[in-house]
Amino acid sequence: MSEILRYEDWSDPVPAADREVVSRLPDDDAGRPPLLFVPGHGHGAAVFAEHWLGHAAGRGFPSHAVTPRPGGDLRARVHDVVQVAAGLPRRTVLIGHGTGGRVVAGALGRYPARAAVLVAPVLAGRIPPAGRVRLPDPVGGPPMLVVGSPDDSVVTRPALDRAAARYGVAPLLFPGMGHDLMLETSWAEPIDAILDWLLKEL
């Protein structure tokens, strides 16, 4: 699988594209790894800029979010995430929401992330041709966290359990919240839990 993907990289390279990246940086460099947030379908970097980027930066994590290229397929979006992550000064923590979780799962096969967090991930995917592409094994075996809500109407509890089981972890649950955890009234709870987990794991 990886050999075919590498062949594609030079025989049919992903077209160049401008990438919107929104960043929030901490006041002091504590040496913590940068975070790269990847939004899902219908969202851009602004969905994380509203609350999570500034909050994570306030806790000492350089925080960035990338907007998917318009009309890009799964391969192009994975490429964009890998390129942005590779351009950051330290090995990056990848955090994907919804179908952005599928993009992060793909990027983990190409980029040795410091850790990865899948938030309400849609791993089956509706980004062509995601439905028929096998998820790669993460390069380097980074720590993995799967986060979601049992009350999510988009990613059901069984789907969340399957996503977590794929990476050998149990999902971290936030009852009473919807699919877009970063926009909920209690938005601080999941991001604080993610940051606490990172501080423990890294």
Image: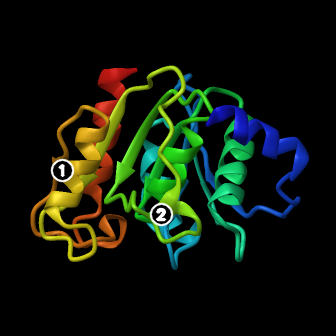
Classify 92 as above or below 74: above
Where in the figure is residue 42, as x and y percent of width and height? Answer: 52, 79
Tag 2 or tag 1, which sits nearer the N-term? 2
Q: CA distance from mark 1 to mark 2?
A: 19 Å
Residue positioned 65% across, 26% down in the render = 90
Where in the figure is residue 113, as x and y percent of width and height? Answer: 55, 30
For label 1, the residue is 161
- Is residue 1 or residue 70 the one in the foreground? 1
Kind of residue at disc 2? Gly
Residue positioned 50% across, 74% down in the render = 41
For label 2, the residue is 131
What's the image's color scheme? rainbow
Tag 1, which secondary structure? helix
172 with respect to 63 (left or right): left
Classify 77 as above or below 197: below
Where in the figure is residue 124, as x and y percent of width and height? Answer: 40, 61
